[in-house]
Image: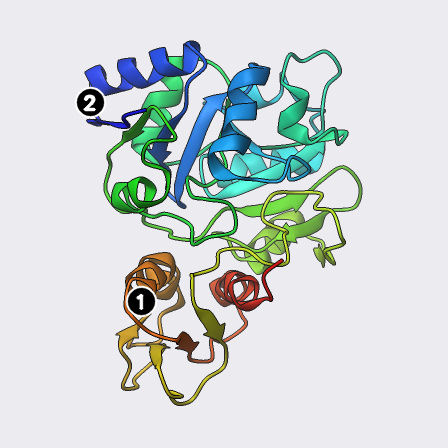
Amino acid sequence: MQTRSLSPDPAGFASAAEIWRAGGLVAFPTETVYGLGADARNDLAVARIFEAKGRPRFNPLIVHVESAAMAQTYVEWSDAAEILASAFWPGPLTLVLPILPGCGLSRLVTADLPTLAIRVPAHPIAHALLAEFGGPVAAPSANPSGRISPTSAEHVLAGLSGRIEAVLDGEACPVGVESTIVGLAGEPTLLRPGGIPGEVLEAALGVHLELYQTGDAPVAPGQMHSHYAPGVRVRLNATDRQEGEVLLGFGPIDADLNLSPSGDLVEAAANLFGHLHALDALDVAGIAVSPIPDIGLGRAINDRLRRAAAPRP
């Protein structure tokens, strides 16, 4: 099919919502990365997400909704959910909660798990689009499964052109890494580091968040061992270039591209996937990456880099 580019205006929002109602796929910007959206109540539409991405069916999806009130129609709400949603929604935070029986969502969304990953995005284009559609939208990152996440419409088209109906063309995503995922089906658990540092969430909840140790099958999106990967090898904690490599730097060093010359983790997160896309497009043998402090947003950056460097299945 021919993938259309839609403008982020009322006409574009109306066209995207109509595509969703007809069971089609539309990529759209959020504050984290571009998502590949479909009506979360439509089995065939959700199945097409997995087909377009080449995503394993056992890997659950995040559902995006317009408000916390809408989220409560799909999941069992809790005091901890209310605390986090009140403080961080709309924003780059996904909550995993027990799904309500008979809520009408496709079972493909949850990969048959008893829980649902759900969030309210903060990006004004995403918010306007969800308001126009008026329902839940399943939306993983808009890229071929396992590859670098997209932070621009150009990234989406490079990976999915011809496989989806449309992309809503917005600016580059400001946060640049996916949402933080917190599991609230039992004791609060950090299922995936992301756009909100775990330390900030711990302060809001007043408890320590245990970091989930990834097993063979994911219990939340973004837990595959090999993920976010360029087409060439990635070498971490590098202090120099080996033959055929380019250097992705951090801090005041000589590098081919630098995530943040000043050592700012917020800037580094925003640049991460865009810089990986740019370096992956070069004719090189590999990408060496400078050490990144494992604090704050650095935990999310390092999580993505470890998965990008993992052996491919």
Question: Picture coordinates of residue 124 (x, y %)?
Answer: 31, 32
Q: Earlier in the sequence, mark 1 or mark 2?
A: 2
Check the picture and name the quadrant holding the N terminus.
top left
Camera sees residue 114? yes
Up-down relation of residue 238 to residue 174 (above or below): below
Question: Picture coordinates of residue 18 (x, y %)?
Answer: 35, 11
**Which residue does the image show at 60% across and 49% down from the upper left?**
204
Return the residue nearer the eye: 198 or 176.
Answer: 176
Residue identified by numbered label 1: 279
Amino acid type of the residue tagged 1 in the rendering = Leu
Residue identified by numbered label 2: 9
Quarter of the rendering containing residue 284 = bottom left
172 sits to left or right of 65? left
Return the residue nearer the eye: 283 or 188.
Answer: 283
Amino acid type of the residue tagged 2 in the rendering = Asp
Secondary structure under badge 1?
Answer: helix
Q: CA distance from mark 1 to mark 2?
A: 32 Å
Question: Picture coordinates of residue 252 (x, y %)?
Answer: 30, 84
Return the residue nearer the eye: 58 or 292.
Answer: 58
**Which residue does the image show at 53% across and 57% down from the upper left?**
197
Within-10-Å neighbours for mark 1: few <14, some 14–19, many 20+? many
Question: Picture coordinates of residue 26 (x, y %)?
Answer: 37, 26
